[in-house]
Image (spheres, rainbow, N blue to C red):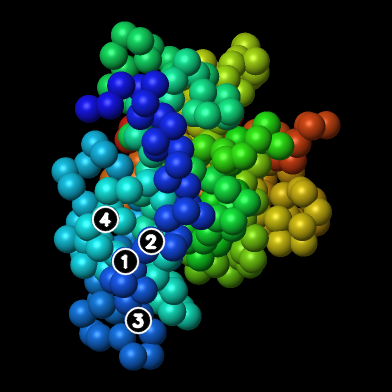
Amino acid sequence: MLPNRLLLPRLLLLTSAALASDVSAQARVEMGGGASADSTSAVDSLRGKSGKLFARLVGARRDGPLRILQELFGDTATRRPGIYRADRGSRSFALITMLPFQAKVAGRIGSYRVGNWPRERSGNSDLPEGFIEITPNNLDTQVSQHFRLRDFLTHDQADVWPKYLVLKESLVDKLELVIADLQGRGIRVKRMAVLSGFRTPQYNAPGVRAGGRASDSRHQYGDAADIFVDNDGNGMMDDLNHDGRVNQGDARVILESVERVEKQYPALVGGAGLYRATGNHAGFVHVDVRGSRARWGTS
């Protein structure tokens, strides 16, 4: 195995742009009109509980990639970091092969500052599996019907590229299920805004204080998002309960949806909290998939 000082430069050469010219023929499998029944059903099986996922993440800690992914994209794509697309209309799908966590050296990946995770040096078993490399060319990759990679990026280092993102498919799946639940109750959701998705530990640390961010915030693990419905794009929560006001009652509408989704899909259980609007942000709901139930700000 290559030492870190040699591994990092080699890994960083495997950018999405460079890999685009090396995608196997299988990654260009037709998934639309002329697709076989097998390829169509294979993609459908990857779309999560919501049926709305447009991407699957693969990392080194998994027990090998799914055979379906190998058949669709080729074995090389499931092992080499990058974003591989199989595009064909509504059947479009992406394989995202992550850069291993070990690519982080001294709190950085290349020029991008990441920091260190809580208890990282003492063997924290909850460390991220890997990082998605984000470039201006893949920033708008759809990971589901309503969400793109850019929605979950840390809000800092605007001029540093590439950036690196930690994201859990189960979070995106849960958010899509919440949207579907709301729509099923007649609540229009054209845009679910993500106020905060992934936060690097170095970005999270300055906000750690009583009443602020937690030092072990789930945002650092890619399985949490602060959300609000913003169909009109004004940066504020919409009037979801139609009482003529925008307040905590509208956030509760989303919370009620989260409760129903968790009841139907226990594997997606997690934390949920309500936050009031301030001068710095709109009111929002925190949603995560930590694996155990937690609630706050709901009284």
At label 2, the amino acid type is Asp
Looking at the image, residue 67 lies above or below residue 38 = above
Horizontal and vertical percent position of residue 240: 67, 57
Determine which of the numbered discs, if any, sits on residue 76 in the image. Answer: 4
Residue holding disc 1 = 24
Q: Residues within 10 Å of mark 1 (few under 14, many from 20)?
A: some
Cα distance in 3D space between marks 4 and 2: 9 Å
Residue that protrudes farthest toward the top in the picture = 122
Q: Would residue 74 be seen by someone viewing this image from the given angle?
A: yes
Q: Indicate the secondary structure of the residue bearing disc 1.
A: loop
Q: Residue at x 58, y 28 (%)?
A: 111
Looking at the image, residue 93 lies above or below residue 281 = below
Q: Nearer the viewer, residue 110 or 66?
A: 110
Q: Quadrant of residue 299?
A: top right
CB of mark 4 within 8 Å of CB of mark 1?
yes
Cα distance in 3D space between marks 4 and 3: 19 Å
Left or right of 116: which side holds 101?
left
